Amino acid sequence: MPDSTKNLPQRVIKLGSYIPSTKAERGEMLSAIGLSDINGLYADVPDSAMFKGLLDLPEGLSELEVRRKMTEIAKQNRVFSTILRGAGSYDHYIPSIVKFITSKEEFVTAYTPYQAELSQGILQSIFEYQTMICSLTGMDVSNASVYDGATAAAEAAAMCVNAKRRTVLISDTAHPDTISVVKTYCFGTDTDVIIIPGKDGKTDISALESMLTETSAAVYIQQPNFFGLIEDAARIGEIAHSSGAKFIMGCNPISLSIMKTPAECGADVAVGEGQPLGIPMSYGGPYLGFMAAEKSMMRHLPGRIVGETVDSDGNRAFVLTLQAREQHIRREKASSNICSNQALCAFTAAVYMSVMGPDGIREAAEQSMSKAHYFAESLCKIKGISMANSGCYFNEFLTKTETDPALILKKLEEAGILGGLPLKDGILWCVTEKVEREKLDEAVDIVREVCK
Amino acid sequence: MNYPKDRMYAKTHEWVRFENDGTASIGVSDFAQHELGELVFVNLPMKGDILKSGEPFAEVESVKAVSDVISPVTGEVEDINEALSDNPQMINEDANTAWFVKIKNISDRTELMDAGQYEEFAAKGD
Amino acid sequence: MELLFEKSVPGRHCFILPKCDVPRTGMPAEFKRAIPLDLPEMSETDVSRHYTELCHNAFGVNCGFYPLGSCTMKYNPRINEEIAAMPEFTCIHPLQPSETVRGCRLVIDKAEKYLCEITGTDAMTFQPAAGAHGEFTGLLLIKAYHLSRNDTKRKKIIIPDSAHGTNPASASMAGFQTVSVPSGKDGCVDIEKLSEVLGDDTAGLMLTNPNTLGLFDKNILKITKMVHDSGGLTYYDGANLNAIMGVVRPGDMGFDVVHLNLHKTFSTPHGGGGPGSGPVGCKAFLREFLPKCTYTEGGNGLQVKSFYGNFLVVVKALAYILTLGAEGIREAASTAVLNANYLMSRISETYEMPYRHTCMHEFVTSLESLKKETGVSALDVAKSLIDWGMHPPTMYFPLIVHEALMFEPTETESKQTLDKAADILIKLYKEAHENPSKMKEAPTKAYIRRPDEVRAARSPILRYDHSK
């Protein structure tokens, strides 16, 4: 192995960053274990497998240089000051204190709290998160998170499948990524997936009725759905149950503060994408999959769960519990392999919810809904633009346009506005509480100009 | 360890007590409950399920482990001990009265030992 | 420590949003939420103090030595956190037009290029959000590959008995049957037993090298060849890559599919249990099966997560790779191995080492004899370490060693830290003989004493009861 201090150019010598050992210390350690050089440690590696020379990677950089390099890369991204696009990633306002609290090193760098005595702070924060998810969804029990809303849907479907019922029905009005992920997970377990068609932007309920059989394990819908419309969830739940299938709802957590909860709609499992709860858009990740279930399905929930108990002095304590469901104990019999989850993201959501409180989240929800409706009404006054679907919606809606959407979006981008998502049937807009009325009016003016 | 003489025992540490009416009840032995440690959950089959001798029909969980309970007989589940689901510690308290299931229409059985033979077998340390 | 809900006072709130500047549209009655929303009502001061209190009862890498075997708790550089928090990375919508996210694409492309070089693979996906997720993904690649060749008999995945629980769990999720192959007396794969289980129903082998005992399997080239000869593919669990990066490449050891744990080897923080990132690399012939975001990239292929993966985690890993460079990568691995061997040598005269051999980045000690002699178990020693300000090592894993404690110091620890830790461990060994009951009561200086886990599992209380 080359001596890394030979032939170094005239600059700061570093022996591989973040390694505290000096040359002298390394020499001492090598003698202590009876080796004369570090290569001796790899005596078991067959010579033909040893990599000769150095990897084809650039030379290491100092902190200052890394900062410059990554900033150069970052500056090739464009940050839009106004975001009118949703479709699975939402630009809600994140209170300043959230970032400070979630940057505390103890929370950021800790491992999973298997050692309860050392980790009561983290365990309690997870217990608080679980409680808040139950409050939001109305369900009895929540886990400590999974990777995102799409994988939560897939894991929920797996909870409902058994020897007799091996078909999962998922609405075509769910997010395309969710459908794709559910299909992939079902490819893994050789479970059948049937897509329930949409009609006028919502789940086709009579089609669903005809598709359910005694082998149906679960019905999944997204609420509000991909097109922003509010589904008739309670009715769909009834239909699912009448054929013995379970009912899974994938929900927008902000909307749940003012909208009928999965519990009120009879859901057996409630899942969703928790990104709107204080997590930035981050080009798609890390996000947060929340999962909550009705009491009887508690032991089928995958992933970690924190429970309350007492310690040997009788004081309240929190621990990871029901671990006999998990992979490290069940191994090949585990229903899910999940180990690491999205702990810090769940923590972020809990902090967000405690700062916003019930009033704050309701306000964010109502303002998002109100601004979306205001914007939709203004847009539809423009000739050539109309709502693609009728029906109640939350903060996303699809408009049909006679003018090419690409032209509309380009003009908006020039003004620093990221417009709605172009779909083959039109533009899918989204408005959150963050967008000021002036900006909405400005956007309408721009669109009107383009559509002339 | 307490191994009542009124029943038979399997190599996998279950006991089975055959009744005069042709049914049988199944549980785990005192040795098993001691090895498993404090039990926190029991996963029982449903009434009407068919059990096959030599195959797992239930699970017991401790905090750190899950173990299969193997059926010593082939037959149909007539009744399940729901109290066990709420109080798995009953198995630790008295494994010999903590029955899991009652089976009817018994048609086959695995190799079984009497109490004396089982006591020797268990003492060998498996 | 009180819960948020116990501190909550009705009517308290923070002042975050302005008044609504448009006419209000409410939720119509038929869709309106009718049950109460029980979330805590706190002032910002309350929230700030609450989380400060919680933070004082958490143990990060910044708090002390964290030698968790199999977890690679190396230092998490602050500069990576700062870079990943830049608005040019956080305020980017995943569905922005491609010309506005050139920076994001560059991050992913560079990370792919460098990580493929490090692993000896040809292509990589960053969709999997964690190691286990990566395992599942990699196994799906293997499944898709065999199916594409109409090789439908291959339903078995071979996994050593020393493997991490996620391996067989992932195999089940991918629809495979797990066949366990025993480890020999030397702790490595038993070659004879392996040849007995290989056949035309073998889909593949899952292996980590060095293995979970911290040992490098000398027979690795033979093993991967045997699997290939039987028509199966080879999967590398990258959890232990920190021992060998820059020194040996999984692709050169004969592996077709590899997953990495960015939150282990590549210094991204553990976050109390996530988010991680488990990218999967593969040889060219498997490239077509890699998952992608079908919504943006089209096709009917596999997708394991929405969008592209845990992007900000990849940003941190890229910054780390740029910092280390070619030499630093190799340096990190060899120093990790040196540190582990040094710590092992300091305590091997006191503690029993089931495998007396040069270890890689981690080693396992067995406290079985100590338990027989004194009644003090691996758990008791681990809990006693808490009173000494150190995070315990991994306990009771791998399953094939009784009363196991697994230590992985990583390269970012100094000789002083290792010496202090060794001194403490040796003291505890003495104490086990002199005062075993004290150790059975440990910890006594932490926020709580030992929790009643049986009660927690028997009568689960999984949320706060607001009706109280």
Image (cartoon, coloured by chain):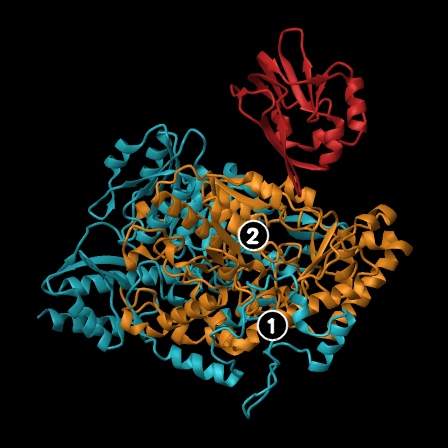
Chain colours: A cyan, B red, C orange
Of C159 and C4, which appears nearest the observer? C159
Q: Nearer the viewer, residue C290 or A161?
A: C290
Q: Position of residue A15 (x, y in %)?
A: 61, 81
Q: Quadrant of the N terminus of chain A?
A: bottom right
Sequence-wise first label, 2 or 1: 2
The quarter of the rendered structure image containing the C terminus of chain A is bottom left
For residue C24, say whether it is visible: no
Residue type indicated by callout 2: Lys
- Is residue A36 placed above or below C150 in the rendered structure? below
Chain of the residue that carries numbered disc 2 in the rendered image? C
Residue at image position (87%, 58%) is: C431
Kindly state the secondary structure of the residue where label 1 is placed.
helix
Count of residue discs = 2
Question: Mark 1 is on which residue type?
Answer: Ala
**Are dots 2 and 1 in contact, CB under 8 Å?**
no
- Kindly give the residue lying farthest to the right in the view shown: C434
Q: Is residue B83 above or below residue A249?
A: above
- Subunit bearing disc 1: C
- The answer to which quarter of the image holds residue C59 is bottom right
> Pointer 2: what residue?
C222
Quadrant in the picture for residue A402: bottom left
Looking at the image, which is closer to me, A133 or C211? Answer: C211
Q: Which residue is mark 1?
A: C332
Q: Look at 77% across and 65% down and name the residue there.
A: C345
Q: Position of residue A312 (x, y in %)?
A: 76, 49
Q: Position of residue A57 (x, y in %)?
A: 47, 75
> Is residue B10 shown above or below A404?
above
Give the answer, above or below, for where A246 lies relative to B17.
Answer: below
Q: Residue C81 vs residue A166: left or right? A: right
Question: Residue A181 placed where, x, y %?
Answer: 37, 50
- Nearest the camera: A15 or C413? A15
